[in-house]
Image (tube, grey):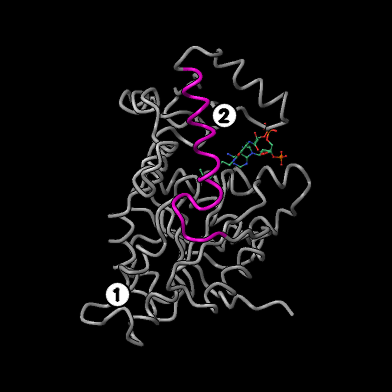
């Protein structure tokens, strides 16, 4: 028997590509009302425009009735503060990859949201256990009933970009995560139309512990002149049937995001195989961040 996720209202923090995608699949596929918050008004406008575009495309391709698209759109409400999320059953955080920022956000979740709300992070590599430790109320110990209840509802729910297209969600259990939180989070991801793969809370989880050394090696091949950009990517597109070569994929993910993940992997393991290449660092220094900034290993209009 499948477990009910019990999410009647969802909060999503961050209206970038990932947060918007998560809001989209939650509203359209899981049919759950979503409160979407981003501290940048500009980002919120971009996020909602992307939702409208995705729904319009599905309607124009005949995959969605316009009445269903309108209903899905009406399920997404922009809100201008975390206070507005105080009654949600689950929140998914999708802000940039920075441990201190995420810990501060989760501390705020702990203080402002319902004590039984599931607190999920879409982090690609940061320790869910470290994030979970931040929600323990001041004065309570980690092992107390209060501490266990607070941190037991924190979980990693790692979606992949583009969220509407990629079929996987990686489910990561912190040391503290309760079974109920894991079961309901899995059920929610499935209601969003995703398959779930679970991973232990190790740096990068399964996905990025394997993907990032691959991307980094490709950048080092380019740096050393082993092959051209186009030949490196062609090797994987045509030789291994990857939809994108590793350099194009790095641009697509964002070079700053790749660097942040690699730094987390390297500092979390001290394993030299995770050391970011100098070329990646220089690209980020130059603000050549990939597709989102108009230039990375490729140029974009
Ligand atoms: N948002 C939503 N939908 C998108 C999209 C986006 N940004 N980009 C493409 N799509 C949709 C298109 O609209 C199209 O949908 P329809 O079939 O319904 O028309 C479909 O994807 C295919 O797109 P295209 O035909 O334009 O192009 P394509 O066949 O080259 O596919 C792609 C584009 C899906 C992005 C494909 O190149 C691909 O799968 N690339 C690899 C992506 C990947 O590996 N993602 C994971 C990155 S790692 C990550 O996210 C996690 C992390 O921790 C770093």
Mark 1: which secondary structure?
Answer: helix
Task: Report crowding for label 1: few under 14, some 14 to 19, many 20 or more residues within 10 A (C-alpha).
Answer: some
User: In terms of image quadrants, where is residue 249?
Assistant: top right
Q: Is residue 261 magenta?
A: no
Q: Is residue 217 magenta?
A: yes
Q: Work out whether residue 87 or residue 221 is closer to the camera in this orientation and state it.
A: 221
Q: Residue furthest front?
A: 271
- Is 195 located above or below residue 50 in the figure? below
> Is label 2 in contact with label 1 (beta carbons under 8 Å)?
no
Residue at 34 percent across and 45 percent down: it is 267
Q: Work out whether residue 124 or residue 142 is closer to the camera in this orientation and state it.
A: 142
Residue 200, position as x, y percentages in the image: 52, 61
Q: Which residues are magenta?
A: 199-222
Residue beneath disc 2: 246
> In the image, 261: left or right of 2?
left
Residue 124, position as x, y percentages in the image: 47, 50
Quarter of the picture containing the N terminus is bottom right
Mark 2: which secondary structure?
Answer: helix
Q: Which mark is residue 121?
A: none
Residue beneath disc 1: 111
- Is 89 located above or below residue 53 in the figure? below
């Amino acid at each position: 028997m499948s477990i009910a996720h019990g999410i009647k209202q969802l909060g999503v923090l961050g209206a970038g590509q990932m947060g918007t995608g998560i809001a989209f699949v939650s509203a359209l596929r899981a049919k759950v009302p979503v409160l979407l918050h981003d501290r940048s008004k500009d980002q919120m406008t971009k996020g909602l425009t992307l939702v409208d575009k995705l729904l319009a495309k599905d309607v124009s391709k005949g995959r969605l009735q316009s009445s269903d698209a309108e209903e899905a759109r009406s399920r997404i409400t922009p809100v201008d503060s975390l206070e507005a999320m105080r009654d949600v059953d689950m929140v998914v955080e999708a802000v940039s990859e920075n441990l201190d920022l995420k810990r501060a956000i989760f501390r705020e979740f702990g203080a402002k949201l319902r004590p039984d709300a599931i607190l999920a992070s879409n982090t690609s590599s940061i320790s869910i256990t470290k994030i979970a430790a931040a929600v323990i109320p001041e004065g309570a110990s980690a092992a107390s009933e209060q501490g266990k209840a607070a941190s037991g509802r924190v979980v990693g729910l790692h979606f992949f970009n583009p969220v509407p297209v990629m079929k996987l969600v990686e489910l990561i259990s912190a040391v503290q995560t309760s079974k109920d939180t894991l079961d309901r989070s899995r059920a929610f991801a499935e209601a969003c139309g995703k398959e779930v793969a679970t991973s232990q809370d190790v740096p990068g989880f399964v996905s990025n512990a394997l993907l990032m050394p691959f991307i980094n090696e490709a950048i080092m091949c380019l740096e050393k002149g082993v092959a051209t950009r186009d030949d490196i990517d062609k090797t994987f597109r045509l030789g291994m049937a990857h939809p994108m070569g590793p350099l194009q994929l790095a641009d697509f993910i964002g070079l700053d995001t790749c660097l942040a993940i690699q730094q987390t992997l390297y500092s979390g393991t001290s394993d030299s195989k995770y050391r970011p290449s100098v070329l990646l660092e220089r690209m980020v220094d130059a603000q050549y961040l990939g597709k989102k900034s108009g230039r990375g290993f490729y140029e974009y209009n």
